[in-house]
Image (tube, rainbow, N blue to C red):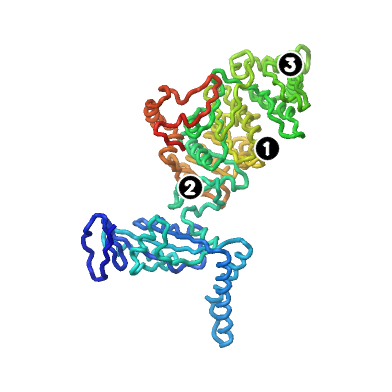
Amino acid sequence: MKLRRRTRDQEPSTLPHPAAIQVGVRTVTLPNAVAASFAVTGYPREVGAGWLEPLLTYPGHLDVSLHIEPIPQQVAAMRLRRQLARLESASRSDAQHGRLADFGAEAAADDATDLADSLARGHGRLFKVGLYATVAAPSEPELAAEVERVRALASSLLLDAQPATFRALQGWTTGLPLGVDSLGATRTFDTTALAAAFPFTSPDLATEVGETSVLYGLSATGSGVVLWNRYAQDNHNSVVLARSGAGKSFFTKLETLRLLYQGVEVAVVDPEDEYARLARAVGGTCLHLGAAGVRWNPFDLPASQGPRDDVLSRRAMFLQTLLATMLGGRLTAQTRAVLDSAIIATYQAAGITRDQATWTRPTPLLADLVSALTSIGGGEGTGSAGAELAVQLAPYVSGSYRELFDGPTTTHPAGHLTVFSLRDLPEEMKAVGTLLALDAIWRRVANPRDRKKRLVVVDEAWLLMKEPEGARFLFRMAKAARKHWAGLAVVTQDAADLLGTELGHAIVANAANQVLLRQAPQAIGAVGDAFDLTEGERQFLLTAERGEALLVAGPASRAAFHIIASPREADLITTDPKHLAELDQGDQRAAQPAGAAYPLDPSGFTEFSDDHDDEEGDPL
């Protein structure tokens, strides 16, 4: 790169080479533009979160750079002591000579005292911060106009922006993404002031940015981005509610993918097999309930959680919940008593008792329970109730729904991403499949020997919410997930099923993270009342475009944002039929057979590896 300086009186000339720049007193002439740089030397005494946003939203070509350098603790403490000594000396000198008090010096002394106290207690640190701005325009007359507007904007923010006179080249390079502060016009900031100056935050959100923070999108009311850390909230649960086609599944898969980047283990209940492409890309596992050859035995006992845990009793109680869902309603007290006795008898017939030594024996099947109920039947009272239950469970043992239950469990899924696909189940079995998947996931989440950050995603939760016992099970998960360092993400398009019951309202109340996308006019009343939305927020949800959402995390944390995804992420998580058709045409050139999303073994259990990456070799 060739550099040539000119004096103040010289007019800009045509650059001798396309790669050359011309350096003036206050400007740098580039091949297609003229640029001028400024250093901020004066700041307001108090600032709020997002106070730099007006500079970031400036409509012209303005580059804002923020250079940060930490000051060692010992050096910071020494400088504060010196500053306090100077201010105290000046104050005493004024008092001895009868001069009026310098209120500015007194305010500075108070600030220095607070900083020293915070530093001594370890509540913060000091940093050298340089704030610079570079303005560019096609010509010098246009640049002069832009400079005046930028300086006026800075003055409105109580910022004193000084031009980089005779240091135009250093100012221009300081604004480049090189991480080099060539001007060195810094000011001392404490941790709180620096956090408020961080430009990539939304002033509408009060959240702790941590290692599991996820980029949700761009703010709809400003130029900032919306970063959210669900694991920094009171609980880690979330509710995603939207009408069909608004982008709720897209958003959920995007958050799932970005949490996987952070080492969070994710389990998904997928009614429509929408997570297959994502699972294939990240090396996840997929279990197709209802596929040929797939068996799932609900009588399987989980590994012992400890010497005091009664695994058998817990399994018996879950089986009562499962069977109530299979039978289409809540059980009466008499029926539940008969069913409990039959379950215990079924385990005893297989040699499994309350003795932990017997819990490793082969478990019985659903057909054995039906046999136990039949043996109880034959008389009056409880016997007739047992016979009736046996008749009602016959379709799951010898009828149309026997495929899933007529054998031992074929697979035990595990991994950083586990997807339970329910697409192959008949519609009448979707709620049962969801409950089985959630039970398998919960056994892994509740294991105290394997604690880690987890997220459980229940897509199309209305399938389970319409069943009373299923809704109660989901509610219990929402209440207990936080104790196991896990979050429950409930995703649904049917507001009535979620908000029309007390259990649904309880699930919403136990979700610290609530994401609302476009709502139907018929549902906006119930949604607005349940989430305490303002009139403006209701109008936003009624007119929101696809991918626009409102994050609600209490009265103090609300932000509207546009969901953003990279092209590679969009290819993995999209449900747009047109986009998927284009991707399928490209997949035909891969080694996999045409029309097969991924190879499926006879057990219905798929484990993805690097061998199944896309043809371009672009692993995530």
At which x and y percent is residue 148? 34, 65
Local crowd size for mark 3, using a 10 Å CA cut-off: few (<14), some (14–19), many (≥20): many
Local crowd size for mark 2, using a 10 Å CA cut-off: few (<14), some (14–19), many (≥20): many
Q: In front here: 435 or 90?
A: 90
**Mark 1 / mark 2, whichever is N-terminal:** 1
Residue lying furthest front:
2
Q: CA distance from mark 1 to mark 2?
A: 39 Å
Residue lying furthest bottom:
97
- Which element is circle 1 on? loop
Q: In front here: 131 or 439?
A: 131
Classify residue 384 by image quadrant.
top right
Q: Nearer the viewer, mark 2 or mark 3?
A: 3
Residue 560 bears which disc, if any? 2
The amino acid marked with disc number 1 is: Arg
At which x and y percent is residue 34? 29, 60
Residue 369 bears which disc, if any? none
Decide if residue 130 is in sight here: yes
Q: Which residue is mark 3?
A: 372
**Mark 2 / mark 3, whichever is N-terminal:** 3
**Mark 3 / mark 1, whichever is N-terminal:** 3
The amino acid marked with disc number 3 is: Ala
At which x and y percent is residue 546? 43, 39
Q: Which residue is mark 1?
A: 449
User: Residue at position x 72%, y 22% from top?
Assistant: 361
Q: Is residue 501 left or right of residue 127?
A: right
Q: Nearer the viewer, mark 3 or mark 1?
A: 1
- Which element is circle 2 on? strand
